[in-house]
Amino acid sequence: MEAPKTVSYSLMFLAIFVLLASALSLANAKIQEHEFVVQATPVKRLCNTHSTITVNGQFPGPTLEVNNGDTLIVKVINKARYNVTIHWHGIRQIRTGWADGPEFVTQCPIRPGESYTYKFTIQGQEGTLWWHAHSSWLRATVYGALIIHPRGGETYPFPKPKRETPILLGEWWDANPIDVERQATQTGAAPNISDAYTINGQPGDLYKCSSQGTTIVPIDSGETNLLRVINAGLNQPLFFSVANHKLIVVGADASYLKPFTTNVIMLGPGQTTDVLIAGDQPPSRYYMAARAYQSAQNAPFDNTTTTAILEYKSAPCPAKGVTAIKPLMPFLPAYNDTNTVTAFSKSLRSPRKVEVPSEIDESLFFTIGLGLNNCPPNFSPSQCQGPNGTRFTSSMNNVSFVLPNKISILQAHHLGVQGVFTTDFPTKPPVEFDYTGNVSRSLWQPIPGTRVTRLKYGSRVQIVLQDTSIVTPENHPIHLHGYDFYVVAEGFGNFNPKKHTSKFNLVDPPMRNTVAVPANGWAVIRFVADNPGAWIMHCHLDVHIGWGLATILLVDNGVGLLESIESPPEDLPLC
Ligand SMILES: *[C@@H]1O[C@H](CO)[C@@H](O)[C@H](O)[C@H]1NC(C)=O
Ligand SMILES: *[C@@H]1O[C@H](CO)[C@@H](O)[C@H](O)[C@H]1NC(C)=O
Ligand SMILES: *[C@@H]1O[C@H](CO)[C@@H](O)[C@H](O)[C@H]1NC(C)=O
Ligand SMILES: *[C@@H]1O[C@H](CO)[C@@H](O)[C@H](O)[C@H]1NC(C)=O
Ligand SMILES: *[C@@H]1O[C@H](CO)[C@@H](O)[C@H](O)[C@H]1NC(C)=O
Ligand SMILES: *[C@@H]1O[C@H](CO)[C@@H](O)[C@H](O)[C@H]1NC(C)=O
Ligand SMILES: *[C@@H]1O[C@H](CO)[C@@H](O)[C@H](O)[C@H]1NC(C)=O
Ligand SMILES: [Cu+2]
């Protein structure tokens, strides 16, 4: 009878060890509590002062810095006159979908005068993410960085940089962005383009009245600065570059990458890229700059350039009475330089071999693109100011997504409320056509609907995202909530499984939460549906979300508590 005893002793020791280890890692993890007051604040930019919606009176809003494993508790108090919600962009929200934030998807909006406390734990993520409003166009000014450091005692997979600087690229309207959005909704036309881009809230000294506040980024000779670049712009993919300094790309969307060197990066709205720059140039002042990558054709865009100044601490001071040294300007690609975008995107690789699902349970094919609605009979011409008297629209698989307005999708699912959505979102385009060719006008008008895709817990999913040339081809940054996914392939023209499947990178594809699908092209993503909840997948150009370029992946609970979504918090806003 000796043997069983030994087994039970060693089992006991194992149990004690496991308990100790988890207690230790819990002791390491911290709980951070914050209060976000959403409020109108006077902000002066481009010579004018606007009553701007901010968080805690800051623009951009506060930077949250946490370690992997920490829990964030953020009480959002709405003192503004608009409905608001906050989304924690790229946080997986494992089992905590109620804290994800998109209005009418995982919660009803926080109404003026009310509050809601978001609570979630960061699990297995490191790098640069951000938070932003996910309600109307409020995120134009309601956003900030969310930086996840490694757990205590763990290190970056590259030498620790001396400094780290969040670089938030934004888009500024010399108007109330909510009015810009409302005007477009009324007229059916494209919304006004922005008046400036910003770096950390400042347009920089190439714009009128803006030299005073230009953002200064410090560096010193011989040291390294980790730039955590975030495209928080509302509608515009952006190129970013630093004069005379190489960018060593080490991460994107809070996933590490095999480091590579480049002069320029491109970020679609929603994307982040971590780059190291070395202080290896003569001590001086250098511009870092961002401007548009524009792939839509015949569409007006904001063609201005935002700058910040990379300043060496040891840079010589200008003599008295002499104006500061004019910084050197970096080379930025032409607005339509798709080749540079493709070369950059093809350089992204995971640091090592990763576990990409090789067998697929759910193979989905979603077209993404614009459309035009004929003017409805009861509309006046002033409401149909899109091309040739139409109204702009947008869709995935010919479904133009409509949000519910009396209950969120997640709550309707949780409570079994019928009639809010249907689970018949098409798994492939209802009509097959030459997606990137000259598309017949009869295919341009999609059908509005709240249709979702239901996925079993743990299913291995592949989605082909195929741009269409309806109205115009365009690079759409498609963002999936609740998940990171591998981008296993990208290309131009029509996706062809026979031709393209064998070329998938199933070894070291990059992991992202937002993929910039090539204009007149496609991207293929793969992930395991291991996080139950209602997850919106949408174009991160806010102009396109409003037109319906979104859908929902509804992931069922698995077996047992640990594979099921938690109960909704008691203060969850209801409609
Ligand atoms: C949009 O631009 C037009 C033309 O410049 C201007 O008249 C209008 O006031 C702008 N709309 C808003 C909401 O700022
Ligand atoms: C955009 O601005 C640049 C100068 O910054 C100019 O060379 C270019 O022609 C402009 N392009 C368009 C399409 O307006
Ligand atoms: C980019 O636009 C310029 C004119 O603005 C045009 O001459 C050039 O051919 C375009 N390049 C590409 C790659 O489309
Ligand atoms: C608008 O109508 C004109 C003239 O019929 C045509 O050339 C153009 O292609 C139309 N534009 C769209 C977007 O349908
Ligand atoms: C696109 O197709 C329409 C009819 O389907 C035709 O009138 C038009 O000329 C075509 N345009 C091009 C550029 O091929
Ligand atoms: C979308 O559906 C509408 C209505 O059935 C149809 O007229 C149109 O051709 C469809 N378009 C595509 C791309 O399937
Ligand atoms: C604010 O949210 C409520 C639902 O909670 C909704 O009924 C109302 O229409 C929203 N207001 C606006 C201006 O969207
Ligand atoms: Cu889009």
Image (cartoon, rainbow, N blue to C red):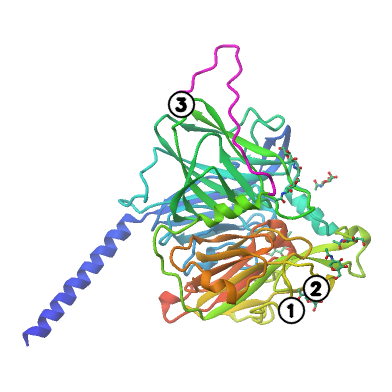
Q: Residues at badges 1 and 2 in contact (C-beta under 8 Å)?
A: yes
Q: From where the camera sits, is residue 76 visible?
A: no
**Mark 3 Cβ inside 8 Å of ligand 2:** no
Q: Amino acid at mark 3?
A: Lys
Q: Residue at x 85, y 59 (%)?
A: 386
Q: Which residues are magenta?
A: 314-336
Question: Residue 313, which numbered label?
Answer: 3
Distance Cα–Cα, label 2 vs label 3: 59 Å
**Mark 2 Cβ inside 8 Å of ligand 6:** yes
Q: Residue at x 54, y 73 (%)?
A: 501
**Mark 1 Cβ inside 8 Å of ligand 6:** yes
Mark closer to the chain start, 2 or 3: 3
129 or 83: nearer the viewer: 129
Q: Is residue 152 left or right of residue 201?
A: left
For the residue labelled by badge 2, is the local secondary structure a helix, a strand or a loop? helix
Residue that carries the numbered disc 1 in the rendered image? 431
14 or 434: nearer the viewer: 434
Look at the image and tell me in which quarter the N terminus lies. Answer: bottom left
Relative to 5, does residue 107 appear above or below in the rendering? above
Q: From where the camera sits, is residue 324 visible?
A: yes
Percent x, y of residue 160: 36, 43
Foreground mark, 2 or 3?
Answer: 2
